[in-house]
Image (tube, rainbow, N blue to C red):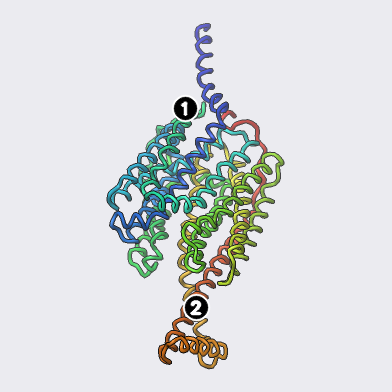
Amino acid sequence: MAVASSQSKPVSKATSSPSDSVHKYRWFILIGLITAAIMEILDSTIVNVALPQMAGNLGATNKEIAWVSTGYILANVVFLPMTGFLTERFGRRNYLSASIIIFIVASMLCGTSHSLEEIVIWRIFQGMGGAALLSTSQATLRQIFSQKEQGIVQALFILGIIVAPTLGPTLGGWITDNWTWNWCFFINLPVGLLSLFIVITLLHDAPNAKRSKAAVDYFGISLLAVGLASLQFVLEEGQEDDWFNSPLIVRLSILSVVALAVMIWWELTPRNKTPVVDFRVLKNRELALSCGLFVALGFGLYGGVYIFPLLAQTLLGFSPTQTGLSLMPGGLGTAFTVLFCGVLTSVVRVDPRILIFTGIGIFAYAMWNLGHLSLQIGQDQVYTGLLIRGLGLGFLFTPINGVAFGTIDPKDAQQASSMVNLSRQLGGSFGLAFIGTYLNNQIQFHRVNLIGHVRESNPAFNLQFQAMTGNLFAHGYSQTDAKSAALGMIDQSLQRQATMQAYNDCWLLVMVFFLMMSPAVLLLRRPRKGAGPAEMH
């Protein structure tokens, strides 16, 4: 008995020491995980600016080179829901380390690619590795930091997620202009190696963590891959292929609905003892409502990043670099309010629901301002609207994260994190697809309305037309050519006015979507107060 007792102590010490080490170096681990997340988010946006140069170097068309982005997103969306299963299967540190290695190696191979097929294949591998850099990293932070530290910790983590898409176009434009598109991938090497060193050296699995050795849910994985990949393809390519006028889009839409419906049934049925995605975690009301709010956030975040560059470069005459720099004030505003909300929730203990409503109000006000722009606007007016938008986004991400995870059991943190990140990603995809189609339709709608005023019985049109014709005639045009040129100039002006009104409609659409989701905040409960690190409970 004495021998058994003496042998039991070292075992206990060995099992507890990894947790003690993780807790001791948790702030260094935070740096490594934030670095990995920023690398992943930045890489998904920085490459978009370099696509035209890639197309020229690789001999691809604009539609073909778009698969550099589409392939990445497809793989990322498919693997996000599976991060919980993979973490349980291989262990937290092993899975994170492997994902970072895959991401780094794929980045280097993307940068050395000499054909479209090569770079698309390696971008798919990048997307596979990138899923854990967000989901597993965020879940790990939930497990190694105490509840009272979560506000500021999640604020720092979210800071990278929000600011990276804003800085991506600026950095990508600078790299493309001064170096080559290959460096958009090569810059991942030093960042990834730093993150990998921290994860391997300081991060350990939780003392009570046991790797799953249950049977693999191959049927569920197949349904998940087919369903989400088909859905994402429809959202990415639907507008280009005229949506349901394309037989391929129709078939993939049906396939995604059927596959996802069967997958949800299969994952929830008692017959499936080892589901690859545990949808039961959504029984938590706060998590389910937060996922809905994150869909709206993804819609607003990525929708705005999509709308403004088009508006700036087609109507305001901004260069790509100027466009990227124009987004920076909003990104800085977001950074400030994210950290501010982290302090309010962690130190002051402000009810996060108050902050969420504040963020919705600020964001809606920004969308209203941006939805009433004109062709005579100054840059200051645009910057002000984008700054207010950024401030509103910062008031939303940190509090919603806090509510989403506030009542989640630590063992469910990984599944919850995958659901939250998938919701944000799908919200962004839905937003880009819907806004792109809506923009084109509204341009045609406003053009038809404006053309109705181009008639001889309209005194305002006659006055403008005669003045332009007379001016052109005075500059040497014949009477016939002067009339034709004047009509052409009026048509161009009309097209610009229709386009501006369509962009205004898009900003207002985002505002309406946000306001429609806001009642969900009333159903949220305030997160409970916690004590020490989750994995030490």
Q: Position of residue 137 (x, y in %)?
A: 50, 39
**Badge 1: few (under 14), some or many (20 or more) residues near its Cα, within 10 Å?**
few
Q: Residue at x 48, y 53 (%)?
A: 170
Residue 248 visible in this rendered orientation of the protein: yes
66 on left or right of 455: left
Circle 1/circle 2 CB separation < 8 Å: no
Classify mark 2: helix, strand or loop: helix
350 on left or right of 429: right
The front one of 442 and 460 is 460
111 on left or right of 382: left
Q: Residue at x 47, y 47 (%)?
A: 41
- Going from N to C along the chain, the mark reached first, 1 or 2, is 1
Query: What type is the residue that disc 2 sits on?
Result: Ser
Residue that numbered label 2 is attached to = 493
Q: Position of residue 150 (x, y in %)?
A: 61, 38
Query: What type is the residue that disc 1 sits on?
Result: Thr
The front one of 371 and 174 is 174
121 on left or right of 17: left
Residue 262 visible in this rendered orientation of the protein: no
The front one of 444 and 4 is 444
Residue that numbered label 1 is attached to = 201
**Badge 2: few (under 14), some or many (20 or more) residues near its Cα, within 10 Å?**
few
CA gap between label 1 and label 2 equals 62 Å
Q: Position of residue 68 (x, y in %)?
A: 36, 53
Classify mark 1: helix, strand or loop: helix
The front one of 223 and 267 is 223
